[in-house]
Image: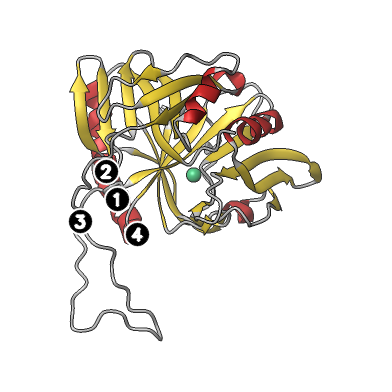
Amino acid sequence: MIKVQDIVYVVYRAPDLDKMEQFLTDFGMYRAKREPDKLYMRGAGDYPYIHVTEKGEPGFAAVGMLAGSEAELDEAARLPGSSAIETIDAPGGGKRVRMQGPDNYRIDLVHGIKPVERLDIRDPLAINFGYEKNRLFELQRPKNESAKIIRLGHCVLKFTDGSAARDWFINTLGMLVTDRLHVPDDPKVTLGTFMRCNRGDKPADHHTIFALHAPGDINVHHVSFEVQDPDAVQIGHYWLQGKGWKQEWGVGRHLLGSQVFDYWRSPWGHIFEHYADGDLLNASVPPGDYPATAENLAQWGPELSPRFFESVVT
Ligand SMILES: [Fe+2]
């Protein structure tokens, strides 16, 4: 059985690669490779790229997820709508199967992409708490810079039938339900499901995929990238503001997943999130169930942006 272990990359299309590179650089990524019609951007972490832009009409093209083993690619290739096993022509190589997800989303199952050396970013800040002092005789001087992304953390997709989509990720990719969100007045109606990778005893992010029920608006909702610590989120916020990019919602702290978050719009109106300090759970944690209220979206932060659920705002 396929058990995805991580999220590796997302693929977008955009008509202007220079503009996309500028945004992603200000957002805290690094150029990995640039071709005439393709842009690969990486984080500071182990993967050779985490964001790909193909030149074209603006839109979301694919999400790449890490297979638990090479054998899982054979399994994926046998499923309806799947490609054969292909060699990936991109930094780090590896193999992939392009799978047909619900609502025809392209889900790439990948294996064997060679890791790269990590890039230098600042260490996590040592914090002096009220009753616990962790930094003595040293000054706190984080640099004013972009948020320095480490890795891709999760992807939120909108589906015609959010429950059917959830079942696909559980049954086809071996994911686990972490938390379900339901209509506040009607607990039977599912609005969305947070799903994590099944890593057995090993910790996994609270969610790697969120399947949002949004008939009539099939699109990516947002993609989220992990940074070093909450200071990096806040410093990155002012960095993006200084560069004139459009903010969407934040800085705040989520309830489900607990991440300190900050949401921005790309030049073509797609939402990109920075996060730090998220929850990690192993496979033994049972699913939670919550009404989809504003309080359950954030523990603290600014009021929810009224256009937050709009896929594209330019
Ligand atoms: Fe998110």
Q: Is residue 268 visible?
A: no
Horizontal side, residue 85 vs residue 157: left or right: left
Q: What residue is pinned by disc 3? A: 144
Q: Nearer the viewer, mark 1 or mark 4?
A: 4
Which label's residue is closer to the chain start, 3 or 1? 3
Image marks 1 and 4: residues in contact by CB distance under 8 Å:
no
Q: Which residue type does callout 3 highlight? A: Asn
Q: Residues within 10 Å of mark 4 (few under 14, many from 20)?
A: some
Q: Residues within 10 Å of mark 2 (few under 14, many from 20)?
A: many
Q: CA distance from mark 3 to mark 2?
A: 12 Å
Q: Residues within 10 Å of mark 1 (few under 14, many from 20)?
A: many
Q: Which residue type does callout 1 highlight? A: Gly
Can you give x and y, in whole percent of width and height, for residue 276 in the image?
A: 40, 55
Q: Nearer the viewer, mark 2 or mark 1?
A: 2
Q: What residue is pinned by disc 1? A: 236
Q: CA distance from mark 3 to mark 1?
A: 8 Å
Which secondary structure lies at badge 3?
A: loop
Q: Residues within 10 Å of mark 3 (few under 14, many from 20)?
A: few
Identify the residue at image location x=29%, y=26%. Answer: 93
Image marks 2 and 1: residues in contact by CB distance under 8 Å:
yes
Q: Which residue type does callout 4 highlight? A: Asp
Q: CA distance from mark 2 to mark 4?
A: 13 Å
Which label's residue is closer to the chain start, 1 or 4? 4
Which label's residue is closer to the chain start, 4 or 3? 3
Q: What residue is pinned by disc 4? A: 229
> Viewer-proximal residue, 279 or 301?
279
Q: CA distance from mark 2 to mark 1?
A: 8 Å
Which secondary structure lies at badge 4?
A: loop
